Image: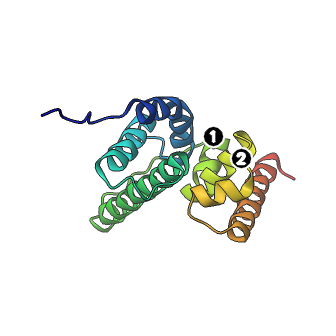
Amino acid sequence: MQRAPQWDEPLLSQLRNLYEPLRRFAAIVGRVDVEPDDLVQEAFTRFLSGDRSAVIDIGAYLRRSIVNLATNERRRNRRAEAAHIRLGAVDGVDDNYPSALSDLLAIDARDRGLLYMVDVEGFPTQDAAQACGMSGPAARMALSRARKALRGSIEMEQGR
């Protein structure tokens, strides 16, 4: 009796080709203290261990998984910080020199993912919206709000 191979080579080749672009995407979407490789590998694990028959576009599916994982991580961290504050252990450390990175990290992970896909990677807005689990009009509105927020924080820093 011959066993079927567990992994088909075209799928592995496609995943290898997607790894670096997904890693860059995860670096933008994820928190600073979370390794992008961890997000990508967790998305790969979920993809490979689940039912892949319904997945039409692997790249979009993995990007949406990464956004969801980053959002879940951010929620866990916020809950931990809130519990930490409730217990009275408040850190007195302030950033005296705020950077553009802190402005970018203030934007929601999904919106950051949209900004990255559209403005950096050059994806059409509709494709980026689908990858992030949004409708096209909602993505355009989120992009507009995110760009406006970034523009406002930069102008405020420059004293305009």
Observer-nearest residue: 84 or 130? 130
| Residue 34 to residue 61: above or below | above
Q: Quadrant of the N terminus?
A: top left
Q: Mark 2 points at which residue?
A: 123
Q: Position of residue 29 (x, y in %)?
A: 54, 48
Is 126 displayed left or right of 15 in the figure?
right
Please say whether residue 124 is visible from this viewpoint: yes
Mark 1 or mark 2, earlier in chain: 1
Residue at (71, 66) in percent of width and height:
136
Quarter occupied by residue 44: top left
| Residue 31 to residue 141: above or below | above
Observer-nearest residue: 81 or 40? 40
Give the residue type at disc 2: Phe
Q: Mark 1 points at which residue?
A: 97
User: Pointer 2: residues within 10 angstroms few (<14), some, or many (20+)?
Assistant: some
Q: Which of marks 1 and 2 is in front?
A: 2
Query: Which residue sits furthest front?
Result: 1
Observer-nearest residue: 126 or 140? 126
Residue at (35, 44) in percent of width and height:
42
Is 127 displayed left or right of 11 in the figure?
right
- The CA span between labels 1 and 2 is 33 Å
Q: Which mark is residue 129?
A: none
Q: What element carries label 1?
A: loop
